Amino acid sequence: MNILVLGRGKTGSLVAEVARRRGHSVQVAGAVENAACAALTPEKLRGIDVVIDFTAPSCVVGHIEACVAAGKNMVVGTTGWHGEVDRIRQLVENHGTGFVYAANFSVGVNLFLEVARAAAAALRHDYSGQIFERHHVHKKDAPSGTALAIRRVISESSGEKKDQLEITSFREGDVVGMHEVVLESAADRIYLCHDAKSRQGFADGAVRAAEWLAGKKGFYDFKDVWREL
Ligand SMILES: NC(=O)c1ccc[n+]([C@@H]2O[C@H](COP(=O)([O-])OP(=O)(O)OC[C@H]3O[C@@H](n4cnc5c(N)ncnc54)[C@H](OP(=O)(O)O)[C@@H]3O)[C@@H](O)[C@H]2O)c1
């Protein structure tokens, strides 16, 4: 495929490397080339099969609007915009493009979400719950999109209110991403933890999601499709 990666940062550069290794033709646009969506005009996107975005919360919605208007499929890893997910879903459906997004593209975290979903039963048995997340000091959004996704699956599964679980965010050194769920009763504590060792899992998942999306239309959450990769 011809892939345009948006973002030359920590994750975008690894996505480009993984995509080339998997045999794709890859272009990359960073903040300078893509100021005010300059790299996302219909002419510039001609010949591109899919755009993969790992940029920043402040610009990602503009990128999505430009790519969808140009009829291009997208894989979006950038976080911090999920409050607009319903509007973007509508936009994608209106334009008949394909779109996969995730707060976390690693298969390990998506398995972890299922473990958390199962453990949420504790909240119906006199347990209280807390979520802790740790990331590097440069991370722009807090709480992390993954922590919000964990809270969402736990509240969906337990039937408890969405805002009930407290999320505590730590920003330390160069931590790639650690998420913990602690469930506590008078009798015991349950600890669940996912600790990303590198960004490799995010990059692999995003490129494989782009391959999965080829020839498809529709709006997909990676947590619902990763088993099909
Ligand atoms: N879903 C997942 O699995 C996952 C995994 C990791 C990270 N993320 C998310 O992905 C995003 C990026 O994370 P990161 O750790 O890679 O951050 P990062 O190292 O800060 O990289 C962000 C890059 O975006 C570039 N950028 C900013 N505005 C741009 C624009 N308008 N067009 C093109 N590029 C632009 C920046 O370019 P300059 O260097 O030129 O300023 C920077 O290199 C964050 O929202 C993070 O939460 C998601």
Image: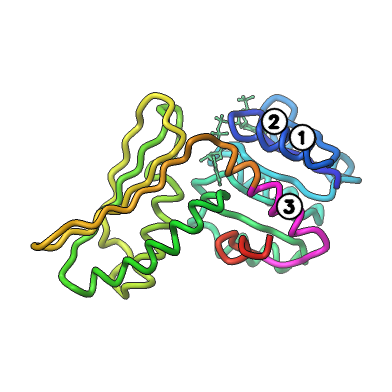
- Is residue 194 found inside the magenta-colored segment of the image? no
- At 27% from the left and 58% from the top, the residue drawn is 165
Q: Which labelled disc corresponds to residue 193?
A: none
Label 3 neighbour load within 10 Å: few <14, some 14-19, many 20+: many
Residue 140 occupies which quadrant of the picture?
A: top left
**Residue receiving disc 1:** 38
Query: With respect to residue 223, does 79 lie above or below?
Result: above
Which of pointers 1 and 3 lies earlier in the amino acid sequence? 1
N-terminal label among 2 and 3: 2
Would residue 178 be found to the left or right of residue 76 on screen? left
Main secondary structure of the magenta stretch:
helix
Q: Which residue sits at x=37%, y=72%?
A: 157
Structural distance between the alpha carbons of marks 2 and 3: 24 Å
Give coordinates of residue 31: x percent, y percent: 66, 28
Please state which of residues 108 and 60 is positioned toward the viewer in this rendering.
108
Taking the image in four quarters, ligand 1 sits in the one at top right
Quadrant placement of the C terminus = bottom right
- Asked if the residue at tag 2 contacts the one at tag 1, i.e. Cβ–Cβ closer than 8 Å, the answer is yes
Residue 211 falls within the magenta-colored stretch: yes
Q: Where is mark 2, residue-wise?
A: 35
| Crowdedness near tag 1: few (<14), some (14–19) or many (≥20) residues, C-alpha within 10 Å | some
Marks 2 and 3 close (CB-CB < 8 Å): no
> Which range of residues does the magenta coloring cover?
205-219
Q: Amino acid at mark 1?
A: Ala
Q: Which residue is mark 3?
A: 210
In space, the residues marked 1 and 3 are separated at their CA atoms by: 22 Å
